[in-house]
Amino acid sequence: METINYQNFRIEAENICVDYNGKVALYDANLRLKPGQICGLVGMNGAGKTTFFNALTGFVNISKGKIRINGESVRSAQKDQTIAYVPQNEGIDSQFPISVWDVVMMGRYGSMNIFRCPRESDVQAVKDAIERVDLTDHLSTPIGNLSGGQRKRTFLARAIAQRASILLLDEPFSGVDIRTEKLISELFIQFKNEGKTILLSTHDMIHVREFCDLVLLINKTVVAYGETSEVFTPENITTTFGGISPDFLFGPES
Amino acid sequence: MELCSFLTLDSFITDPLTHDFMRKALLMSSLVAAVCGFLSSYLTLKGWALMGDAVSHSVMPGVVVAYALGLPFSLGAFIFGVGSVALIGFIKQKSRVKEDTVIGLVFTGFFALGIVLVSKIKSNIDLHSILFGSPLGISLSDVKQTIFISLLVVILLSIFRKDLMLYCFDPRHAKTVGINVLFLHYLLLTCLSLAAVVGLQSVGIILVVAMLITPGATAYLLTDKFDNMTIISVLSAIISSLIGIYISFWFDLETGGSIVLAQTFIFLFAFLFAPRYGIFKLKKFFAGYK
C-alpha cells in the first residue's frame, strides 16, 4: 500500500459512514481536497450533504472510516479553528436578539479565553471581516432586520473572522440577491488565492460549472467525484438524482 | 385601620416591611426571581419552555425522597430533574413517539410519583407548600440554601453567558470551533433543575414554570439585544415578585399565584405595547406612518 502524505491534503475522508440510531445517512464516502480547491457537493435533499458537513466538523460522530483535517484529527481541527461552517439561512433562528457584530465576533470565540473577552486583535479581525463582506453600515443591526443576502454575508464574515483554512458552505447562493451573489463569487476567488479549501453544497448547476474545480455527487454514498469538466455529466447527474434527468430538474440549459 | 392605611402609598410599601416574615419573603422571592429570570432568557431562545415545565414538575419526587432521607432537598431535586431529561432523551431515541408527547408523559409520571410518595411517607412535608409555594414561611436553613443555590446558578450563568448564548443560537458553530457543546447542554439543564428547586419555594412546583418562561418571553418582545434581554428579564421577574407579594399581603391572596399573575400582566403589557413587536406598534405610532 502506498503511503499517503496527509500534509498535502486539507480534507481527507476515507470510507466514512454516519448513521442516526441505526438509520444510515451516509456510507463509504471518500473525499480528498487540497489547499486552494473549490469543491461542489451536489445531491438531492436527504442525500447526506448536511450529514457530510456535520461529519467533517465533528457535529456528528462517524460510525466507520477516518477523517483527517490537515493530517490531524477532527478534534484537533476544532481546537485549531481550522474549519468554518456557514449555515443555510433556514438553519438559523433569524429572530434571535443578536447583532451583526455579535455574530461575527462568535467566529473568534474559539480562540478567546473562557470569558470570551475580545482582545484588540479580535476586534480588528471582526472589523476587517465585516468590511470584506460590505456590512460596515450594519454593525449593530439585529440579524432579524437584515435581508437574506445580508444575513448570508454576516455568516461569511464570521467564517472570515475565524481565519479558518477550510470553509464549508451550505447552500451559499440560495435566497440571496444579485449583489450578494457577486460578492460571494469574488470572495471565493480571493479565498482560493489565499489557499483556503472550500466545500459548498448547492442546488444550482450553473454555480457548480462556474466556481467548482471539483464536484462530489452524492446519494447516500459517492456517485461520482472528480474534475467538474469530467464528472459533471448528464448521466452522473441523472444517477445522483435517482433517475430523474437533469433537463427535467433544472431546465434544458443545464 | 388597614383599609385606610394603604390609601397612602408610603404605608402601602412600608407597613409590610415591619414584619420579619415579609422582609424575608421579599428578599427570597427577589433572589429566586433573579435566578429564574436570568435562566428564562436562555430557555426562551433555546425553545426549551416545555423542558422547563418537565424539569420543574419532575423534581417533585426528588424533593420528597430527599426529605424522607434527611438529605438537602436540592440534591434530590437535582437528581430527578436531570434524570427526567435523560429519560426523555432515551425514550425519544428508542421509540417512535414524538418529543412533546414523551415530555408530557415523563413529567406527569414523575409528578404523580411525587404525589403518591408524599401520601405514603408520613412526614412533616406539607404538600400544599410544595405545590403552591410558601414564601411567607421560609425557614432559616431554607434561606441559606436558597442564597447558596441562587449564587451558584448566577455565577455559572455569568461565566458561561456568551457560550450559552452561542449554544442556543448556533450549536453547530460552537462545536466546529471546539467549544464543548455537551457540557453546555448539561450546564443549562443543571441550572434549570437548581432554579426549579429554589423557585419551588416561592411560587411552588406548579407555577415555577411561569417564573422560567414568562420573564424571558416578556423581554424577548422588548429588545433586539441579548444582554438587554437578560437584564429586562431579570428586572421584570423581580418587579413581579415584589408586586405579587405586596398584593397578596394587602388583599390576603395566595402569594405564588399573585407573583405569577403579576408576571403575566407585565407580559400582556409588553404584548400590547412593546415599541417594535407589540400589537400596537408604538414606535411606528409615535414616528407617524411614513
Image (spheres, coloured by chain):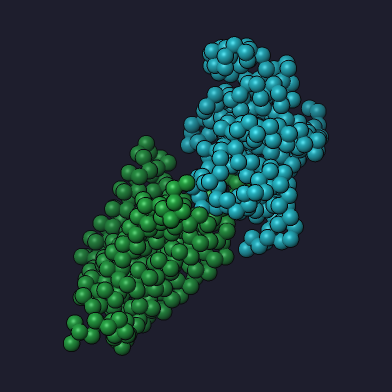
Tally the marks.
0
Q: Residue B6, position in %: x, y?
A: 24, 82
Q: Residue A184, position in %: x, y?
A: 68, 35
Seen at 64% across and 41% down, the residue is: A153
Front residue of B193 and B43: B43
Q: Which chain is cyan?
A: A
Front residue of B229 and B255: B229
Give the image quarter of residue B212. Answer: bottom left
What hue does chain B carry in this figure? Answer: green
Whether B225 is drawn above or below B154: the answer is above
Front residue of B131 and A184: A184
Q: In the rendered view of the protein, which quadrant contains the C terminus of chain A?
A: top right
Image position of A190 (left or right of A109)? right
Q: Residue B27, position in %: x, y?
A: 38, 78
Q: In the rendered view of the protein, which quadrant contains the N terminus of chain A?
A: top right
Q: Residue B94, position in %: x, y?
A: 40, 40
Seen at 54% across and 66% down, the residue is: B158
Residue A221, visible in the rendered structure: no
Give the image quarter of residue A40. Answer: top right
Residue A165, visible in the rendered structure: yes
Seen at 62% across and 63% down, the residue is: A115
Whether B148 is drawn above or below A17: the answer is below
Seen at 61% across and 24% down, the residue is: A204
